[in-house]
Structures are given as structure tokens and as C-alpha cells.
């Protein structure tokens, strides 16, 4: 992912060309066109689940009777978005809109790599171009690519020197958080002082306005809060690994469809769920400690996207659910990190790409085998989850070393933290 040469315009022709070729194949596959046509049609998540939610939302209410609806009210926006493409049926319109968001992210990354100062790298463009295809057709069959586009836009806006940059960053973060929560973690790396105040206020205002708008317009906007609390341990999460092993040694539990996902049910599941929740709290505490200790380190241009990737990784690995589409978030955040030559997250990005490959090996190709107790499928899943865990730990360590001032005996600092040696692999 390290580019050579001096002309960024010429170097960008290669990733754009690869993007065109890979999207021609994979978007066609997601649409089930040409050689990819199938009697089953577009992915069931779009054609059945999303379409069912669309019908309910179109009637003027949230699907509050459906326990699989576990999203903030803003999630109605991407579900209803196919209305913008009235000449296509719902499923095909949804995939097309996801492809448009993919193209928008590419254009934004290309613009940042081409026209920003000389410290920008083409590696970020390559990360996006290569990362999504490693997830097969999943990115174009889930609305996560739409949320990721908002998050990438927010981070790129924050990197601008314009007077409106922090307000736009905060507003986009607030909108993204009302759609799928995790973009709120982008706020963790904002520089102290005026920039934090502007961006945090903008995030709160935009989130409140969208939420209140839905509360006034449609009943059931906050039903997701109840259903989230009932979630167990999804079979692809890090917390599920002990149960994949235990089922071969007499464990009396089993997996079953629950709250819209495949979860383990049985002895010790609730205990592991509580441990996962506790680890999430610990991760949040670490992020607060980093924010307090980093100080001037957060003024570096790379600090905001690097902190965002670290925060999201920590919350992904401590989550009770690690769905394949979560990797779309990580690819997008890693792409913004790699635009900065001084980023601390370069080796983390390689681990994310490895996790994408392992994710696709398990889902969709070996998912039924995994549910059936296949040892090879479970080992691949364990490898994927452990790679993500390693990425989260490495990300946190490198972020800390790159941004927290070192101390010397007597409690005095050594000045602003350096990043020498952290930007290479």
C-alpha cells in the first residue's frame, strides 16, 4: 500500500482503474446481473429484511414490533433511500445507491490525495479500492457503506483548514451516530479547546434535530433501545469462540436465531455477554485516559483518524456482535488514516485487510458449516477474531506511543510526542 513516484495524479490512475474493474464485477454480482443471475435474486438482507422495514417505515411508523430492528431512528434514512431511484425495484435501487456511496468515498479520497499538501499518500485510496472487494458482495448489500461514507466525509472535512471544517465534521458525526451509533467514536480524537467545542456542539445539535424530527413524525423511534439490551452472543463474535470449542466437549447449549442474528443460547452465555459489556466499559475508560494524556499530540493531522480507527476497533472486538459488514467501517477509517504519511496505523491497516479475507472465508462461504459445528470453519473464525483483537491492541499501543508525551524521572515531559519509526510497517 506504499506508493512511489512524484506525480500524485498519475499514481491515482492505477487505483481508479482497479476500482472500476472490481466494482464492475462485484456490483454486477450484488445485482445478480449477467453471469451472476440467480433465481434467489438480490441478497435476502435487502430483498426481504430491508424491504420489509421499508414497507413499515413508508406507512409512517418504525418497525417497533420487529426485534431485529435494533438501530437508531436515523437508520430509516438509508432504508427509505431507494425512493430516490423510482425507476428500479427496491432491491436493485438499494444496491445501486450503495455503489454510488462507494464511488463518492473513492472520489473524496482521490481528491484528498491529489489536492492536499505533500504529506498525503495514495495508500489511503488503495485501501478503499482493495479492501471492499475482499468482503465479496457484502458492502453493496448492507447500508453500512452509506454510514461509512458519512464517517469518511466527516474525517476529511475535519482535515480541512476552512473555518467551517469543525462544524461540518461534527454535524456529519451526529448524523452518522443517529443512523448507526459508531460514528460518535470519531469525536474521541478532536483537538482540545475551540475545535472540540465546535465539533461536539455541532454533533449534538445535528443528532438531536434528526432524532426529534423522527420522534415527532413517526412512533417507535426509540424502540431499538429495548431490543439492544436483549442481545446475546452472536456466533461470529470474539465472545463466541469459547462456545464453538465447548460444543465439542459436552456443552449443553446451542445456537438459534434470536433478535435478527444467530446467537448462542445456554449456560454461561449471559456471563460472557456481561464480560463483553464490561470490556467495552474498560475500552471506553482507556480512550478517556488517552484523551487526557495525549494533549498536544491530538493537534497532529493524523491523530483524529488514527484515534477513530483505534476507538472503533476496540468497540468492535468487545462487542457481542461482529457482523461481516463491520469490516466496511474499518476499511473506510483505515483508508483515511493511510492518507497521512505519518499515521501510526499502517500495520493495523494490513491486519484489517487480513481480517477481511478471513471474514469472507467464513461468511458467506462456510457459514452453514460454522453453524453445523465444522472445526475448520470455527478455526477460520477464530483466526479472524484474533486478527481483529491483535489489530485493536496494536492500534491502541501505536496510537499511545505516537501521541502521548513521554515522561522522564521527576515527572517532566519531553515535549510533543514524535512519530519517528511509527509510519512504516
Image: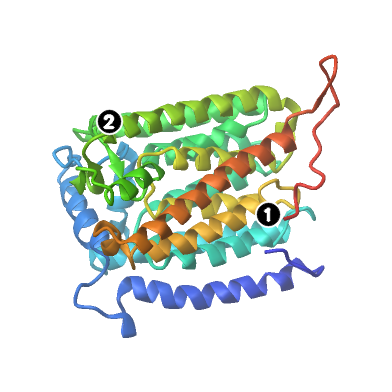
Q: Earlier in the sequence, mark 1 or mark 2?
A: 2
Residue at left offset 50%, top offset 57%: 355
Image x and y of residue 44, in percent: 23, 62
Q: Quadrant of residue 289?
A: top right
Reply above or below: 271 against 335: above
Q: Which mark is residue 339?
A: 1
Residue sticking out furthest to the front: 249
Q: Secondary structure at mark 2?
A: helix
Q: Is residue 140 visible?
A: no
Q: Which mark is residue 229?
A: 2
Q: Quadrant of residue 311?
A: top right
The quadrant of the image that shows the N terminus is bottom right
Image x and y of residue 186, in percent: 54, 37
Residue at left offset 20%, top offset 49%: 53
Reply above or below: 36 against 144: below
Report crowding for label 1: few under 14, some 14 to 19, many 20 or more residues within 10 A (C-alpha): many
Residue at left offset 36%, top offset 57%: 378
Tag nearer the camera, 1 or 2 = 2
Q: Is residue 239 left or right of residue 285?
A: left
Report crowding for label 2: few under 14, some 14 to 19, many 20 or more residues within 10 A (C-alpha): few
Residue sticking out furthest to the top: 410
Image x and y of residue 322, in percent: 39, 47
Q: CA distance from mark 1 to mark 2?
A: 37 Å
Tell me how many marks there are.
Answer: 2
Report the front residue among 77 and 278.
278
The quadrant of the image that shows the C terminus is bottom right
Amino acid at each position: 500500500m506504499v506508493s512511489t513516484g512524484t506525480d500524485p495524479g498519475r499514481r491515482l490512475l492505477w487505483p481508479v482503474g482497479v476500482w472500476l474493474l472490481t466494482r464492475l464485477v462485484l456490483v454486477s454480482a450484488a445485482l445478480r446481473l449477467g453471469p451472476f443471475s440467480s433465481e434467489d435474486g438480490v441478497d435476502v438482507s435487502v430483498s426481504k429484511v430491508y424491504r420489509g422495514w421499508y414497507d413499515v417505515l413508508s406507512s409512517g411508523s418504525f418497525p417497533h414490533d420487529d426485534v431485529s430492528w435494533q438501530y437508531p431512528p436515523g437508520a430509516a434514512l438509508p432504508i427509505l433511500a431507494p425512493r430516490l431511484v423510482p425507476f428500479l425495484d427496491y432491491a436493485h435501487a438499494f444496491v445501486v445507491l450503495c455503489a454510488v456511496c462507494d464511488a463518492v468515498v473513492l472520489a473524496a479520497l482521490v481528491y484528498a490525495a491529489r489536492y492536499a499538501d505533500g504529506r498525503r499518500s495514495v495508500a489511503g485510496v488503495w485501501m478503499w479500492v482493495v479492501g471492499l472487494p475482499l468482503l465479496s458482495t457484502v458492502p453493496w448489500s448492507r447500508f453500512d457503506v452509506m454510514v461509512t461514507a458519512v464517517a469518511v466525509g466527516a474525517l476529511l472535512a475535519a482535515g480541512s483548514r476552512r473555518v467551517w471544517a469543525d462544524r461540518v465534521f461534527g454535524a456529519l458525526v451526529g448524523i452518522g451516530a443517529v443512523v448507526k451509533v459508531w460514528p460518535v467514536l470519531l469525536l474521541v480524537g478532536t483537538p482540545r479547546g475551540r475545535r472540540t467545542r465546535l465539533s461536539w456542539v455541532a454533533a449534538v445539535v445535528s443528532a438531536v434535530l434528526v432524532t426529534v424530527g423522527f420522534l415527532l413524525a413517526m412512533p417507535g423511534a426509540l424502540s431499538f433501545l429495548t431490543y439492544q439490551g436483549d442481545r446475546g452472543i452472536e456466533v461470529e463474535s470474539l465472545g463466541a469462540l469459547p462456545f464453538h470449542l465447548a460444543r465439542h466437549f459436552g456443552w449443553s447449549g446451542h445456537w438459534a436465531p434470536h433478535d435478527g442474528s444467530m446467537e448462542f443460547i445456554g449456560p454461561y452465555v449471559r456471563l460472557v455477554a456481561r464480560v463483553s459489556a464490561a470490556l467495552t466499559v474498560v475500552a471506553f475508560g482507556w480512550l478517556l485516559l488517552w484523551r487526557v494524556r495525549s494533549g498536544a499530540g491530538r493537534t497532529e493531522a493524523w491523530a483524529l483518524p488514527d484515534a477513530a480507527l483505534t476507538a472503533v476497533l476496540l468497540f468492535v472486538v468487545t462487542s457481542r456482535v461482529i457482523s461481516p459488514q463491520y469490516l466496511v467501517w474499518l476499511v473506510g477509517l483505515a483508508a483515511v488514516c493511510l492518507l497521512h504519511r505519518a499515521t501510526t496505523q499502517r500495520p493495523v491497516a494490513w491486519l484489517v485487510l487480513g481480517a477481511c479475507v478471513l471474514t469472507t472465508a467464513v461468511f458467506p462461504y462456510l457459514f452453514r458449516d460454522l453453524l453445523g459445528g465444522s472445526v475448520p470453519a470455527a478455526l477460520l473464525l477464530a483466526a479472524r477474531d484474533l486478527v481483529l483483537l491483535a489489530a485493536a491492541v496494536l492500534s491502541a499501543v501505536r496510537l499511545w506511543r505516537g501521541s502521548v508525551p513521554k515522561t522522564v524521572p521527576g515527572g517532566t515531559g519531553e515535549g510533543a510526542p514524535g512519530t519517528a519509526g511509527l509510519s512504516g510497517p
